[in-house]
Image (cartoon, rainbow, N blue to C red):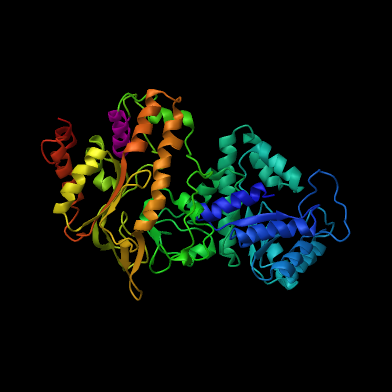
Amino acid sequence: QETSSMAIANAALNFCGLDTMLHLTCAQQTKAEITKHLTKAKALGIKNILALRGDPPDGNEWKVEENDFNYGTDLVKHIRAEFGDYFTICVAGYPHGHPDCTDYYEDIIHLKEKVDAGADFIITQLFFESKTFLKFYRDCREVGIEVPIIPGILPIQGYQSLRHLTKLSKLEVPQVIKDAIMPIKDDDIAVRNYGVQLAVKMCRELFESGVVNGFHFYTLNREVAVIDILKQIGLWCEDPLARKALPWKQSGNQKRRYSEDVRPIFWATRPKSYIHRTQEWDDFPNGRWGSSASPAFGELKDYYLFYLCSRSKPETRRAMWLEELECLEDVYHVFECYITGKKNKYNIKVTSLPWNDDEIAGETSLICKQLAHVNHNGVLTINSQPSVNGISSTDPVHGWGSAGGYVYQKAYLEFFASQEFVTCLLEVLKNYPLVNYHIINIKGTQDITNCHPHSPIAVTWGVFPGAEIIQPTVVDPVTFQYWKDEAFTLWQTHWGSLYPEYSQSREIINFIQDSFYLVNLVDNEYVTGNILWRLLDDVLLKMGKITERFDANKSQDELEK
């Protein structure tokens, strides 16, 4: 059975793109049980293991068991015997000596045994003074331990939590720290500030020693103090481009990270869904998307009802998307509020939609006025990007990839629209030969496109020094048919289900889901700007929805008149 630690490590690695180390204890577990956990970890792409003996789960005293795991060394040996060099193994070091070992130097010999068994590096237990770690470091080196030793830093964040931790770890707090904390022990903020400054002092001293290159922070799910420390010692990075190797966030799974560099644009605002739907693929598109019909990329399975639900609670979503819907225009109103950041008619800010769990991206704000205009008129947009022609790869809004490159984008727009709108759209599209389109209904019985049925269109690409052109985002006709299942289903699972069955609100959502079309448009004329807004205005003019073209250069007051 998957442990909670395994589930968290899986989510952090595969869905959040974070390098992850799974903590694995072997106390009172059989070799078969440990092998089962490690096999599962390997299947999930987890490569880093913190191998610990741990404490008996029942709280009893430790007892040696024959033929099972008694020490961390046994666990390290087992991992290496069963899985070779697949896992990077970390073990624990104790600058004050392990509490169950009566002799400090004997404990260091046991640590060397763990390293000799195959451990790759060491993270230490907490300590309160830098000199404690530096002595431990020298003693380890003297007995022949050559692997990296990373100091474990736990900021003091409260008097009671400090007492509890020292009791568990059987550590003695230096008198100088006790004397500093006692006068402020009832002031949590003062204790936290003291703990931050103490940790900053230790980190700086350890850096200056020349033997420390990084730290392991114990946050205990309280990240504020650690962020403060990182900022003060210069390790906190706020550069939005610092890790943006591609326009979309990469998975931390090494199988994907080093082989996948192309994705369909449809899941741009639902990357976790895409990762979940493609997690069983044997190969990932690299260099180019290729043919969607190729079995080398596996199948996009029907995972659109999977467990990764909206982060917002039902009551929060209903407040944002209106307690009651009276007409289609109420739905248009919600979309418009999401785009503009304005509050809805009940004074609630709309911060998400079923297809977008986050507030709008930076580059979307550049076309906010145009998006608000079309949503107000019933063109319900769920994905978009503006055109870009040779902007620096370090641009704070559009940039991605290495420095010195240039990035390009074709304008892209994806939306739901009524049958009436689609009929007029097909007529207007005859005047726009450089626009690719794909229009489909919920059942797929109406599937209209001017794209090649199996050839993707690159909509984002980059040119970088000494490298081939990278095209990380595509519009693919075959994949769009899989995406439409998910896109249409979200109307009901995330929005319609908020209302009672047979209610007017539910019926309005059902009507949109059943009768509207999902449309994507690609403007291939990226050099001269975006003609999609003119195209949509032509449709709205033809329908009589507007009497003149929209002018995004007008002030907000002028637009509202």
Tell me, yes or no, if residue 335 can be seen here.
Answer: yes
> What are the residue bounds of the magenta stretch?
328-343
Q: In this view, does 10 lie to the left or right of 69?
A: left
**The quarter of the displayed image where residue 180 is located:** top right
Q: Position of residue 269 (x, y in %)?
A: 39, 48
Q: Is residue 61 left or right of residue 461?
A: right
**Residue under the point 76% across and 65% down:** 78
Q: Does the magenta stretch include residue 436?
A: no
Prevalent SS, magenta region: helix
Viewer-side residue, 7 vs 208 = 7
For the image shown, how many numbered marks are present on the structure? 0
In this view, the residue farthest toward the left is 548
Q: In this view, does 494 lie above or below 148?
A: above
Q: In this view, does 145 lie to the left or right of 281?
A: right
Q: Is residue 536 above or below residue 404?
A: above
Q: In this view, does 367 lie above or below 91?
A: above
Q: Where is residue 189 in the image (x, y as percent from the top left)?
A: 56, 36
In this view, the residue farthest toward the bottom is 466
Q: Where is residue 297 in the image (x, y as percent from the top left)?
A: 47, 64
Viewer-side residue, 173 vs 536 = 536
**Residue under the point 36% across and 47% down:** 444
Quadrant occupied by the C terminus: top left
Q: Position of residue 35 (x, y in %)?
A: 73, 60
Tell me, yes or no, if residue 241 can be seen here.
Answer: no
Viewer-side residue, 278 vs 551 = 278
